[in-house]
C-alpha cells in the first residue's frame, strides 16, 4: 500500500491504513499551484514538472516533504513556498483545497514517447474535483495495480522488472494470472479487501507520461509506457479513445481498515 500526501510527489509505503470515501487517509490532501498560471502542478506535463518526482512527501500533521538535497520542508513552515519554489525552479504555493475549476496539464503520452520528456508537446486540460470534492484525485480515490499486470509488462522490458511505484498505485494486489491486465475484467465488480473494505472498480487506468520518468533514484524508463501502449491499449471509459492502461480506478463502497497481506476477493 502507498499513499501520496502531495499530488505528483513520491509518497510513502504503508502497512495499514483507514480507507474512507475519499480514499486512503492522508492521500492527495495537498497539491502545489503554479503561481504563474493558477494550475495544479503535475508531472503529467513532464517538460515543466518532472522534477516533482524528485520530492517525497510523508503523511502526518503537518505533511513533511523531503527535497532532493535531503533537507525537509514542513507544510506548516512559513517559508515552505519559497523553499519549494527554489527546489522546482518555478513559483509555487502549497494548497489544501482545489481552487474552483481546478485543472492540470496532461501531455499527450504518445507525443512524449515520440519526442522526449523535454520536448514541448501538445497538452490537454484535466479537470479535478469530480472524484471526491475537496481532494486532488484525477478520476477516482483509489488506484490499484496487480502483480499480474506488472509481470506482463516486465516480461517485455529489456532492463528487468518494472518497479510498481512507476504506476503510483494505492494498492498492489498479488494475483497469479499469466495473461496479465486482469484489472480490465474487474470493471463493474466489487473487491472485498480484508474483513471491512469494499471497493467497486470503475475503469482501467489510462497511463500518462509519469511511468517513464525518473522517480527519485529510479531512472527514466520509456518502455514502462511503450509496452502497455503495445499490449494493453483499451477504452477506459466510453467517451475516450483507446489508451495504454495499467491498473484500475475504484470507488469506496464500504469504508474500512486494511492491512498489508489482507485477502482480496473479487465479487
Image: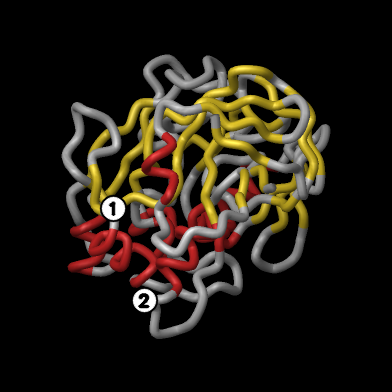
Residue 223 placed where, x, y %?
34, 72
Q: Earlier in the sequence, mark 2 or mark 1?
A: 2
Specify the quadrant of the image occupied by residue 46: bottom left
Towards the viewer: 82 or 228: 228
Q: In what element is the residue under mark 2? A: loop
Q: Relative to 232, is 171 on the left or the right?
A: right
Secondary structure at badge 1 equals strand
Q: Where residue 222 sits in the image (x, y, percent)?
A: 35, 71
Q: Which quarter of the rendered picture does the C terminus lie within? A: top right
Comparing labels 2 and 1, the label whose residue is closer to the camera: 2
- Residue picked out by circle 2: 156
Residue 198 location (% of width, % of height): 63, 25
Above or below, 20 relative to 1? above
Q: Is residue 189 visible?
A: yes
Residue displayed at 29% across by 37% down: 236
Q: Where 206 sits versus 178, above or below? A: above
Could you say which quadrant of the image residue 111 lies in? bottom left
Q: Which mark is residue 244?
A: 1
Q: Residues within 10 Å of mark 2 (few under 14, many from 20)?
A: some
Describe the colour scheme in one phrase.
secondary structure
Nearest the viewer among 188 and 83 is: 188
Farthest bottom residue in view: 158
Q: In the image, what residue occupies the spot 38% across and 49% down?
A: 44
In this view, the residue in front, 23 or 177, is: 177
Q: Nearer the viewer, residue 83 or 238?
A: 238
Q: Is residue 221 above or below residue 168?
A: below
Amino acid at each position: 500500500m502507498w499513499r501520496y500526501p502531495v499530488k505528483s510527489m513520491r509518497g510513502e509505503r504503508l502497512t495499514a491504513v483507514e480507507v474512507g470515501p475519499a480514499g486512503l487517509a492522508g492521500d492527495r490532501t495537498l497539491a502545489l499551484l503554479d503561481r504563474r498560471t493558477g494550475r495544479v502542478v503535475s508531472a503529467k506535463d513532464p517538460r515543466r514538472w518532472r522534477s516533482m518526482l524528485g520530492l517525497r512527501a510523508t503523511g502526518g500533521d503537518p505533511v513533511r516533504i523531503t527535497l532532493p538535497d535531503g533537507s525537509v520542508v514542513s507544510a506548516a513552515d512559513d517559508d515552505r513556498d519559497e523553499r519549494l519554489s527554489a527546489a522546482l525552479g518555478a513559483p509555487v504555493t502549497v494548497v489544501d483545497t482545489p481552487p474552483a475549476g481546478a485543472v492540470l496539464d496532461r501531455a499527450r503520452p504518445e507525443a512524449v514517447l515520440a519526442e522526449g520528456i523535454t520536448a514541448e508537446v501538445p497538452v490537454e486540460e484535466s479537470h479535478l474535483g469530480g472524484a471526491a470534492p475537496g481532494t486532488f484525485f484525477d478520476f477516482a480515490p483509489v488506484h490499484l495495480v496487480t502483480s499480474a499486470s506488472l509481470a506482463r509488462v516486465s516480461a517485455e522490458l529489456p532492463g528487468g522488472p518494472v518497479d510498481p511505484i512507476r504506476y503510483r498505485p494505492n494498492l498492489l494486489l498479488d494475483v497469479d494470472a499469466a495473461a496479465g491486465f486482469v484489472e480490465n475484467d474487474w470493471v463493474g465488480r466489487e473487491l472485498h479487501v480484508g474483513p471491512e473494505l469494499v471497493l467497486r472498480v470503475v475503469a482501467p487506468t489510462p497511463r500518462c507520461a509519469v511511468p517513464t520518468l525518473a522517480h527519485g533514484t529510479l531512472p527514466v524508463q520509456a518502455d514502462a509506457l511503450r509496452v502497455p501502449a503495445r499490449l494493453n491499449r483499451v477504452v477506459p471509459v466510453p467517451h475516450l479513445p483507446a489508451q495504454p492502461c495499467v491498473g484500475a480506478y475504484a470507488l469506496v463502497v464500504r469504508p474500512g481498515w486494511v492491512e498489508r497481506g489482507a485477502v482480496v476477493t473479487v465479487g
